[in-house]
């Protein structure tokens, strides 16, 4: 998909969400803008074949964030704004993957499977990241998450309880275990409390933060080639094209004849057979001329029309 038709719908649809996520994983607005510039550069350099999903965009954003963090590893992180909540400051003190996992889970409702796609890890690893992030932020939320267990089965139960959007946490086996395990009941209650307090704090911080219009225009401009950039290749190629055109006119037989032969065209797309079109085109163009030099050239292009605005070109 050309960048000129990709970036504007991407940042129109996902711009505010991507900006908020960038604020979660960078120190401030300036670094968030740099991160989105890196995302736009990546989309321009390696555009997807179709419009990317939110998970695909977040995966690219995460790759850009990891690259930026590696470059800035030796630099001192700027101090946090003292007006921010303790929970928001605590989140920014955590490693990048944990910040991303907790933010996407609480703000966008990502389950471990979708977290795995955005973070580039397996679902089990995303569960572990989420648990580490929640335990680390619990003191700032004024809670603690107990780690006491009554049996080895508790670990599997808590892996299901961590994903508050999962249906598994409401299954009969999980509820039955909770009925007889005070340790897991305490874990479940504290986990939900910490998640609710943290989610409310993050939403208060990020709800008013929308992608600035100036930044949106700069990001979309990545997909619009400048006039000089568009003309520069043609200026260099004009002499070469002129020479090649002269050679082709002298050497290739039939070069000045009609370039296109309409083999078949019908208003009924159901009756069109591409194999028949190819066969007819080959019969017309694949036979050597009856007279002329021993070396000959043939070329054909067949346009398979589906309607007045849609067709498939077949070349040989």
Image: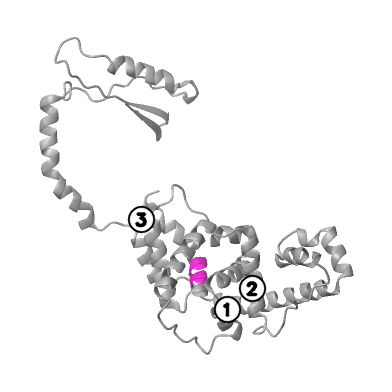
Instruction: Say if mark 1 contacts mark 2, CB within 8 Å.
Output: no
Q: Is residue 110 visible?
A: no
- Distance between the alpha carbons at the discs numbered 3 and 1: 32 Å
Image coordinates of residue 125 in percent, x first then y, are 62, 63
Image coordinates of residue 229 in percent, x first then y, are 22, 56
Q: Can you say whether 5 is above or below 136 in the image?
A: above
**Which label sits in the foreground, 3 or 2?**
2
Q: Going by the image, does 240 lie left or right of 212?
A: left
- The residue that disc 3 covers is 45
The residue sitting at 17% across, 25% down in the picture is 255
Instruction: Say if mark 3 contacts mark 1, CB within 8 Å.
Output: no
- Quadrant housing residue 102: bottom right
Is tag 3's residue or tag 2's residue first in the polypeptide sequence? 3
Mark 3, other Cα within 10 Å: few <14 / some 14–19 / many ≥20: few
Label placed on residue 248 = none
- Distance between the alpha carbons at the discs numbered 3 and 2: 35 Å
Is-magenta flag for residue 53?
A: no
Q: Which residues are magenta?
A: 15-22
The residue sitting at 37% across, 61% down in the picture is 41
- The residue that disc 1 covers is 91
- The residue that disc 2 covers is 132
């Amino acid at each position: 998909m050309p960048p000129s038709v990709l970036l504007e719908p991407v940042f129109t649809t996902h711009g505010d969400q991507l900006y908020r996520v960038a604020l979660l994983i960078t120190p401030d607005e300036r670094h968030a803008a740099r991160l989105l510039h890196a995302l736009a550069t990546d989309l321009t350099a390696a555009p997807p074949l179709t419009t990317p999903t939110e998970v695909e965009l977040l995966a690219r954003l995460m790759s850009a964030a990891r690259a930026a963090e590696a470059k800035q590893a030796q630099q001192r992180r700027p101090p946090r704004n003292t007006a921010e909540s303790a929970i928001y400051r605590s989140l920014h003190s955590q490693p990048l993957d944990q910040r991303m996992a907790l933010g996407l889970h609480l703000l966008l409702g990502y389950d471990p499977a979708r977290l795995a796609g955005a973070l580039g890890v397996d679902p089990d690893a995303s569960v572990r990241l989420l648990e580490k992030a929640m335990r680390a932020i619990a003191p700032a939320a004024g809670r603690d998450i107990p780690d006491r267990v009554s049996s080895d089965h508790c670990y599997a139960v808590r892996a299901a309880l961590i994903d508050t959007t999962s249906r598994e946490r409401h299954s009969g086996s999980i509820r039955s275990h909770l009925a007889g395990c005070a340790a897991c009941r305490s874990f479940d209650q504290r986990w939900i409390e910490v998640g609710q307090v943290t989610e409310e704090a993050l939403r208060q911080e990020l709800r008013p933060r929308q992608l600035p219009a100036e930044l949106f225009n700069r990001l979309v401009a990545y997909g619009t080639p400048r006039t000089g950039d568009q003309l520069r290749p043609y200026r260099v190629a004009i002499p070469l094209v002129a020479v090649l055109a002269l050679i082709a006119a002298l050497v290739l037989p039939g070069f000045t004849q009609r370039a296109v032969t309409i083999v078949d065209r019908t208003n009924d797309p159901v009756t069109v057979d591409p194999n028949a079109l190819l066969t007819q085109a080959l019969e017309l163009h694949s036979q050597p001329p009856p007279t002329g030099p021993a070396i000959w050239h043939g070329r054909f292009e067949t346009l398979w029309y589906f309607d007045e605005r849609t067709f498939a070109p077949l070349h040989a």
